[in-house]
Image (spheres, rainbow, N blue to C red):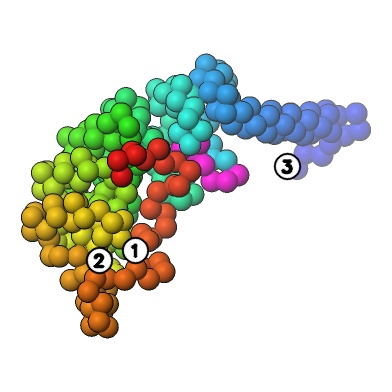
Amino acid sequence: MKLLAKPGSLFPLRAACAAALWLACAAAQAGSYDDFFTRIIRDDAKGIEALVQRGFDPNTVSEKGETGLTQAFKLDSYRAAKGMIALPSTNVNLANAKGETPLMMAAIKGQVDLAKALIARDADVNREGWTPLHYAVSAPSEDGSDLQMVALLLEHHAYIDAASPNGTTPLMMAAQYGTRSAVQLLIKEGADPKLKNQQGLTASDFATRADRSEVVSWLVQAGAAPAGSGSAGATAAAKGGSSPKAQPGVYVPQTPAFPQEGRRKIQSNW
């Protein structure tokens, strides 16, 4: 039997109240969204916790595709990051629009304690494509935190020869961007210096591009072929060059290798 609203009934009033309530909730959610990312900027962990206790989702993504956690790391808002990691509702493996996870950001920022907290929450140490280990060796530090980070990841079974989308390994990244100590640690722990990426380049080729002759020597001693023996180097040699000549883009890892704005100060001895 179909019910019809009679004159003076409560149906119109209820509909109006429901619409008003929906609008109020939408406005509150929008306000919470702005407040959430403002509190990250301000490094306000307690304010973020209060928002979440009121029902806000800490896994909300910004208009630029950043998660709350990845945004906190990029802004050096480490109190906020620590607070969000501790929240049970936070997805610690949620990646941003570039495919970067919170652990990858902790690795490149040298935040060892926060990396430990993420791993304790079951953050993925291994993943397809770029990994936390790639990021850890790509950002030299002056306080040795890069080595601590590499050691931490390896201790938790990071695959030492993980391949990026174009086949670049952590050792290749370390050979061009990392510290001497990071290269030595990877070699000591069994990284394969003979591997080539999809462009036919080895870790020795990456080190040669950065004019790191000492690193090239270590890699050769560890079993790598001399720089330039890969397909790219062989092509250069066939043209009469004694060493591989860098061509635009040849040695640049496939984007995103690591965020340029996230790199820490490179040691002066490089």
Residue underneath mark 2? 201
2 and 1 marks in contact (CB < 8 Å)? yes
Which residue is found at the position 34% from the left and 63% from the top?
251
Answer with mark 2 or mark 1, whichever residue precedes in sequence.
2
Q: Is residue 141 left or right of residue 37?
A: left
- Quick check: can you spot residue 46? yes
- Quick check: can you spot residue 53? no
- Amino acid type, label 1: Tyr
Q: Which mark is residue 1?
A: 3
Where is residue 21 shown, x and y percent of the image? 74, 29
- Considering only vertical position in the picture, is 83 above or below 256? above
Answer with mark 3 or mark 2, whichever residue precedes in sequence.
3
Which residue is farthest bottom?
Answer: 239
1 and 3 marks in contact (CB < 8 Å)? no
**Is residue 69 inside the magenta stretch?**
yes
Q: What element carries label 2?
A: loop
246 or 71: nearer the eye? 246
Which residue is found at the position 26% from the left and 60% from the top?
208
Q: Is residue 72 left or right of residue 189?
A: right
- Amino acid type, label 3: Met
Where is residue 137 shown, x and y percent of the image? 28, 44
Residue underneath mark 1? 251
- Span of residues in magenta: 63-71
For the C terminus, the image quarter is top left
Where is residue 23 shown, x and y percent of the image? 75, 33
Which residue is found at the position 10% from the left and 44% from the top?
188
Answer with mark 1 or mark 3, whichever residue precedes in sequence.
3
CA distance separating discs 3 and 2: 77 Å
For the N terminus, the image quarter is top right
Where is residue 126 shown, x and y percent of the image? 26, 45
Q: Which of marks 3 and 2 is in front?
A: 2
